[in-house]
Amino acid sequence: MAAADNRKVARQFFEDVFTKGAIETVDEIFADDYVGHSSANLRRPIKGPAGIKRFVQMYRQAFPDIEFKFEDILTQGDKVAVRWTTVGTHKAALFGIPPTGKRMTVTGIGIAQIAGGRIGVSFSEVDMLSLVTQLGVGPKLR
């Protein structure tokens, strides 16, 4: 796939699925055997379209006004790397943390391998320490 096509798939995930809630788009852009490794999923790898749907819905429920802003998007071959900033207001429980009503701003970086317009595997690191600190349940940082 061309670099522009891989960028489009990445944008569809962050803008359409995560920000706008177009969860049906997951079936179009994720491979049936998708595996996602993310520090934002504290449990285990995310598997298949059903797994990514549960993951997105969990975060959209906790942060219903969640938005992503791309800081950088790079492509090479069948891979796309994205550095983003996300913002949202904590309105429902997340990983046992009751809603705080606090606004968060968190950064992350992800790399996805895309074949035939579908994400097959992804790796992402999200600043979860910053998230829990902003919600008031993490350590006090200077």
Image: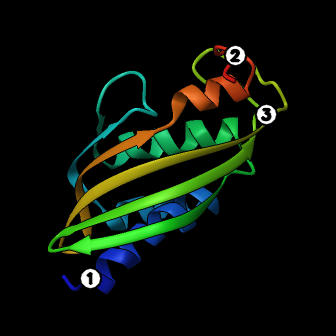
| Gap between marks 1 and 2 measured at Cα | 41 Å
Tell me whether the residue at label 1 lies in contact with that at label 2, contact meaning CB atoms closer than 8 angstroms: no
| Gap between marks 2 and 3 measured at Cα | 22 Å
Q: Is residue 89 left or right of residue 12?
A: right
Q: Residues within 10 Å of mark 2 (few under 14, many from 20)?
A: few
Q: Where residue 91 is drawn, which disc sits there?
A: 3
On screen, residue 47 above or below 76: above
Which residue is depicted at the point 82% across and 33% down? 102
Q: Position of residue 6 (x, y in %)?
A: 30, 75
Q: Mark 2 sits on what residue?
A: 140
SS for dot 1: helix
Image quadrant where one finds the N terminus: bottom left
Which residue is depicted at the point 55% across and 26% down? 129
Q: Position of residue 112 (x, y in %)?
A: 27, 58
Q: Position of residue 139 (x, y in %)?
A: 64, 13
Badge 1 or badge 2: first in the primary sequence: 1
Residue type highlighted by circle 1: Ala
Q: Nearer the viewer, residue 73 or 11?
A: 73
Badge 3 or badge 1: first in the primary sequence: 1
SS for dot 2: loop
Q: Residues within 10 Å of mark 1 (few under 14, many from 20)?
A: some
Q: Mark 1 sits on what residue?
A: 3
> Which numbered disc, 2 or 3, marks the residue closer to the eye?
2
On screen, residue 1 above or below 87: below
Residue type highlighted by circle 3: Lys
Residue 120, image quadrant: bottom left
Badge 2 or badge 3: first in the primary sequence: 3
On screen, residue 38 above or below 42: below
Residue 43, image quadrant: top left
Which residue is depicted at the point 45% across and 58% down? 83
Q: Position of residue 69 (x, y in %)?
A: 60, 64
